[in-house]
Image: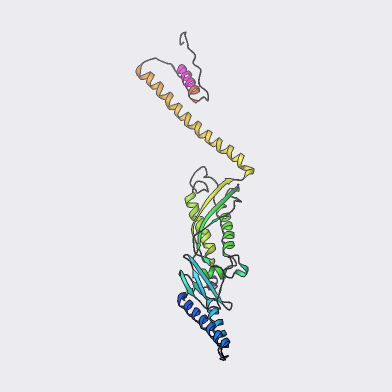
């Protein structure tokens, strides 16, 4: 509740049309010029201060003219206080004493820059973190975000662009250390590599919870880079290769045993040859060597008796 009370409520202004105020300003400037000319060419000197006053008022009113492009907003402050936000696109007139404030614009003091409401992409640099098993990994994310509450973005954090970048780094570390890089042997848990969709959703929720205070909405967050750290990459590659070799060998052995069993059954059913247990064992051994070997077997023709 305390955090919610500190949030700045956004106030959307219905600014006046700029065309009417532009016309009034031009008329005041024109009348002021006429008064000054008349006062200078005649004895009606009283027109001079009137003309100068009208010129000053006309020029001052021009300061309040603002152009708002699509998906942009003007956050206005009046004498140090939040005045409101102009979100509607068009040509408007606001109080000339109001200042446009945006601390993330890069301008001196943050003044004079519009705030973008477009969807923006944050591509954080790769960072080294530890996964659930303690293995050092390199991970980088791409975040699609946009400002939905201009008052919070400008007034509740120092710089909303830097803020979301920092919070993304923290969220990555938080999520990465809760899951292993790869699926475990039993395969019943999420992993950073194997559960990309689920991890992306978890990462999105984690970041969103951290940037709500800045009035930012996270549209998408996904892992763009994931790899073991260089110091253990070679060892992990060997482990993956060993696992692949073992799995392949198991497949080969299962197939070889099935083929040997089928061969013995066919020989017995068709009555091609009668083999005792010793010869069956020798045949099984030879077939397994041939089927499970890494190299092609060299055939040897037996010209003598089988026994």
How far from the left and from the top, in percent, is residue 123? 55, 54
- Tell which of 247 and 109 is nearer to you: 109
Q: Which stretch appears magenta?
A: 273-287
Q: Which of 66 and 175 is in front in this view?
A: 66
**What is the image's colouring?**
rainbow
Q: What residue lies at 59% left-to-right and 62% top-to-bottom?
A: 162
Q: Nearer the viewer, residue 126 or 4?
A: 126
Q: Residue furthest front?
A: 41
The relative height of residue 114 versus residue 275 in the rendered view (above or below) is below
Residue at (46% x, 70% y) in the render: 90
Q: Can residue 131 be seen in this view?
A: no
Q: Residue at x 50, y 32 (%)?
A: 248
**Is residue 85 shown to the viewer in this render?**
yes
Tell me which residue sits at (49%, 20%) in the image.
Answer: 286
- Residue at the far left: name it: 270
From the viewer's perspective, is 35 left or right of 274?
right
Establish if 56 lies above or below 157.
Answer: below
Position of residue 177 relative to residue 101, above or below, is: above
Could you tell me how many numbered marks the image carries?
0
Quadrant in the rendering for residue 45: bottom right
* 278 inside magenta stretch: yes
Residue 168 among those drawn in magenta: no
Prevailing secondary structure class for the magenta stretch in the rendered image: helix
Q: Where does residue 241 sit, x and y in percent of width and height?
A: 55, 36
Most extreme residue toward the right is: 231
Decide: is 44 above or below 203.
Answer: below
Q: Which of the two residues, 37 or 133, is positioned nearer the viewer here?
A: 37
Q: Residue 14 location in percent, x, y?
A: 45, 75
């Amino acid at each position: 509740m305390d955090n919610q009370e500190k949030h700045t409520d956004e106030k959307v202004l219905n600014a006046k049309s700029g065309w009417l105020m532009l016309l009034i300003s031009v008329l005041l400037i024109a009348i002021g010029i006429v008064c000054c000319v008349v006062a200078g060419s005649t004895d009606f000197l009283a027109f001079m201060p009137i003309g100068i006053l009208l010129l000053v008022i006309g020029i001052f009113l021009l300061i309040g003219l603002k152009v708002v492009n699509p998906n942009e907003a003007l956050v206005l402050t009046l004498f140090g206080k939040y005045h409101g936000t102009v979100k509607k696109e068009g040509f408007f007139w606001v109080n000339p004493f109001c200042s446009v404030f945006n601390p993330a614009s890069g301008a001196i003091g943050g003044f004079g820059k519009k705030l973008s409401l477009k969807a923006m992409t944050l591509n954080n640099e790769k960072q080294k973190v530890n996964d659930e098993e303690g293995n050092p990994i390199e991970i980088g994310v791409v975040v699609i975000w946009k400002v939905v509450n201009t008052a919070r973005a400008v007034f509740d954090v120092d710089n909303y662009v830097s803020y979301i970048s920092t919070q993304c780094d923290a969220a990555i570390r938080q999520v990465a250390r809760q899951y292993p890089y790869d699926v475990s042997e039993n395969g019943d848990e999420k992993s950073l590599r194997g559960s990309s969709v689920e991890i992306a959703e978890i990462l999105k929720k984690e970041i969103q919870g951290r940037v709500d205070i800045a009035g930012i909405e996270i549209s998408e967050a996904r892992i763009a880079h994931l790899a073991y750290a260089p110091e253990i990459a070679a060892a992990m590659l060997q482990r993956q290769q060993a696992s692949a070799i073992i799995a392949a060998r198991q497949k080969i052995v299962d197939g070889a045993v099935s083929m040997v069993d089928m061969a013995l059954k066919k020989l017995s059913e068709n009555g091609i040859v009668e083999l005792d247990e010793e010869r069956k064992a020798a045949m099984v051994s030879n077939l397994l060597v041939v089927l499970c070997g890494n190299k092609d077997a060299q055939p040897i023709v037996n010209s003598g008796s089988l026994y």
